[in-house]
């Protein structure tokens, strides 16, 4: 699998060494070849360039996704996550579901953001491609779709002009609430599990976790 991924990624032209390496990692983590992840990857790179920013390694940038749930947009979101470095785990990717292939990339320090939307034409083409109509709609898993269908779909976004893939608005001013992270853990007085202090509740003067509280959060 890794050799195959390397071969496909190496055959794509026009990527910098870093973009190629992250794309290889992205494909390994995503797990299958599809059209959505690379479209998100390209859109993520476009967002970084428009914002004049580098891939996020800490928590200074944030992606707000307007895709929803249950409508084949998760692959696109993974691509954005891998390209921008704004990951779900770091708490710098969140969803405000609207069922749209749109996202904001926010630089929290600079208080600037760009808004990126997938172009109608490319989205319509993706939904009418055999990958969807002949396989996904019929319940076939992406890993079971023949390579002659999946590979060209994976490589296609990199052969297109950026302006044919995404529409970019901004950069514009954008402020987010700045909250300090919690560095303390406390022991739940009922179950004994350690819990982040900002998720513990005091009951009768003792810390209690979400699972053990009598009052709800
Ligand atoms: Zn996918
Ligand atoms: Zn507890």
Image (spheres, grey):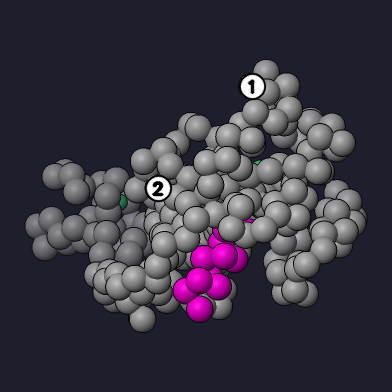
Q: Horizontal and vertical percent for residue 213?
A: 20, 47
In this picture, which residue range is highlighted in magenta?
42-52
Q: Residue at x 41, y 38 (%)?
A: 99
The local secondary structure at tag 2 comes to loop
Q: Residue furthest left?
A: 204
Residue beneath disc 1: 137
Q: Would you say residue 89 is visible in this rendering? A: no
Determine the main secondary structure of the stretch shown in magenta.
helix
Residue 163, quarter of picture: bottom right
Whether tag 2 and tag 1 are in contact, CB under 8 A, the answer is: no
Q: Residue furthest bottom?
A: 110
Q: Residue at x 45, y 36 (%)?
A: 69
Q: Horizontal and vertical percent for residue 188?
A: 28, 58
Q: Horizontal and vertical percent for residue 16?
A: 75, 73
Residue 120, placed above or below residue 128: below
Q: Residue at x 36, y 41 (%)?
A: 98
Q: Horizontal and vertical percent for residue 175?
A: 27, 71
Query: Residue 46 lies in magenta, yes or no?
Result: yes
Determine whether the beta carbon of the residue marked 1 sits less than 8 angstroms from the nearest atom of ligand 1.
no
Q: Residue at x 76, y 61 (%)?
A: 24
Residue beneath disc 2: 66
Q: Mark 1 or mark 2, which is nearer the start of the sequence? A: 2
């Amino acid at each position: 699998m890794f050799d195959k991924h390397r071969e496909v990624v190496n055959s794509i032209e026009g990527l910098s060494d870093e973009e190629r390496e992250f794309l290889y990692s992205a494909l390994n983590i995503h797990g299958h070849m599809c059209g959505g992840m690379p479209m998100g990857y390209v859109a993520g790179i476009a967002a970084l360039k428009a914002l004049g920013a580098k891939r996020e390694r800490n928590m200074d940038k944030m992606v707000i996704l307007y895709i929803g749930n249950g409508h084949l947009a998760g692959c696109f979101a993974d691509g954005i996550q891998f390209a921008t470095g704004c990951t779900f785990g770091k708490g710098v990717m969140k969803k405000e579901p609207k069922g749209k292939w749109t996202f904001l990339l926010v630089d929290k320090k600079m208080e600037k953001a760009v808004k990126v939307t997938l172009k109608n034409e490319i989205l319509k083409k993706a939904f009418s491609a055999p990958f969807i109509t002949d396989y996904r709609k019929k319940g076939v898993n992406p890993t079971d779709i023949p390579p002659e269908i999946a590979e060209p779909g994976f490589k296609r976004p990199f052969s297109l002009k950026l302006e044919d893939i995404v529409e970019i608005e901004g950069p514009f001013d954008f402020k987010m609430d700045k909250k300090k992270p919690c560095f303390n853990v406390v022991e739940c007085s009922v179950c004994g599990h350690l819990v982040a202090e900002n998720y513990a509740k005091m009951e009768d003067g003792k810390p209690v976790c979400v699972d053990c509280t009598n009052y709800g959060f």
